[in-house]
Image (spheres, helix red, strand yellow):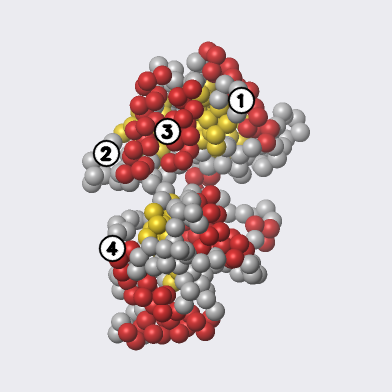
Amino acid sequence: MLEFYQQMAEALKQQPVVLATVARIKGSVPREVGAKMVIRADGSIIGTIGGGAGEAKVIRQARSVLETGEKQFVEIDLSGAPQRETQGVCGGMMQVWLERWQGETAWVLVNQIIERLKSGKSGTLVTPFEQDRSPHLHLPPPTEPPPSSPILHPSFLLEPLLSPPTLLIIGAGHVAVPLAHIAYQCGFRILVQDDRPEFANSQRFPEAAAILAQPISEALDSVPEMPELYAALVTRGYRHDLAALQLLVQREIKYIGMIGSEKRVKTVLHTLQQEMNLDAETQFIASPQTIHAPIGLDIGALTPEEIAVSICAELIKVRRGGTGLPLSSKPGQVEQSPVRERSL
């Protein structure tokens, strides 16, 4: 989300753009309510609302919105019904709200959004479905959390501004490099820790928001508490795993994953239990999460790149609440997230 709005801000420096927002959905569709795409005057885009003929229809309509400034809904029919002009066969329908953004007001709003996302402060973007009202930010008091997902009303859409999840990669070896790259592409903010500066540096990890080339105890002191913190231990040895886990299990962390064979994993967890004097039934102190070890989903990964894909798949599963099962395992019975069950 942060990168999307940063790219949108750059586009607004040059010319007006159209912001396409998925507002209503029904049935099986490629994107969720709140998914966004920016369309420039030349037809180039930032982001996606699902691709295919439906997205092409939105891009065509956006040119009209750029010229007239007339906001509008565009309906994308993905039902595949033979008697209708459809843009796909996913089985559902989408309504996309198109609105021209231009001038100082739009520039200020986009930069407000960027600053909120960077700071981790909560906020809600309000998008009215009316010609004479413009999008704006609702900034609640600190005690009022934003909604966890978009809320659709008949005349407006409420979207929470949520900071991207942070992935702390502990260990900067062979697996860490593709892991940082793939996780960044999946929307994670990347932190890399390793006490070896020749491994932990910006040349090897250009996507990282921070490089922590220091011992794990010092590194974790500089990482503030945050609700969406994930940790992946891909270190060079079990002693490094142990040192990290002794600190991590005392924090509220959404996910801890540790690479290694089953023997290494058992050795580390057994030693952790002994050194921290934990009861057999209480392996973790302040956090309810489990340690995902060995890390990743079982896809038969062998190379560092394949292992990174396996790890990222598990990260996405934890973040989004998936099952990890093949989508083809139950034909016609793929579960949908709550936001996709909202009617048109």
Q: Residue at x 34, y 75 (%)?
A: 246
Residue 166 point in image, percent of width and height: 41, 55
- Give the residue number, with chain letter if any, for mark 3: 157
- Give the residue number, with chain letter if any, for mark 4: 221
Determine which of the numbered discs, if any, sits on residue 140 in the image.
2
Q: Residue at x 33, y 46 (%)?
A: 120
- Three-letter code, disc 1: Gly
Say which of marks 1 and 2 sits in front: 1
Say which of marks 3 and 4 sits in front: 4
Q: Residues within 10 Å of mark 4 (few under 14, many from 20)?
A: few
Q: Residues within 10 Å of mark 3 (few under 14, many from 20)?
A: many
Residue 276 point in image, percent of width and height: 30, 82
Residue 320 point in image, percent of width and height: 49, 54
Secondary element type, mark 3: strand
Query: Looking at this view, is 19 or 197 the one in front?
Result: 197
Q: Answer yes or no: do the residues labelled 4 and 2 have beta carbons within 8 Å?
A: no
- Sequence-wise first label, 3 or 4: 3
Q: CA distance from mark 3 to mark 4?
A: 39 Å
Secondary element type, mark 4: helix
- Three-letter code, disc 3: Leu
Q: Residue at x 44, y 58 (%)?
A: 201
- Three-letter code, disc 2: Pro
Would residue 149 be seen by someone viewing this image from the given angle? yes
- Sequence-wise first label, 4 or 1: 1
Secondary element type, mark 1: loop
- Sequence-wise first label, 3 or 2: 2
Determine which of the numbered discs, if any, sits on residue 43 in the image.
1
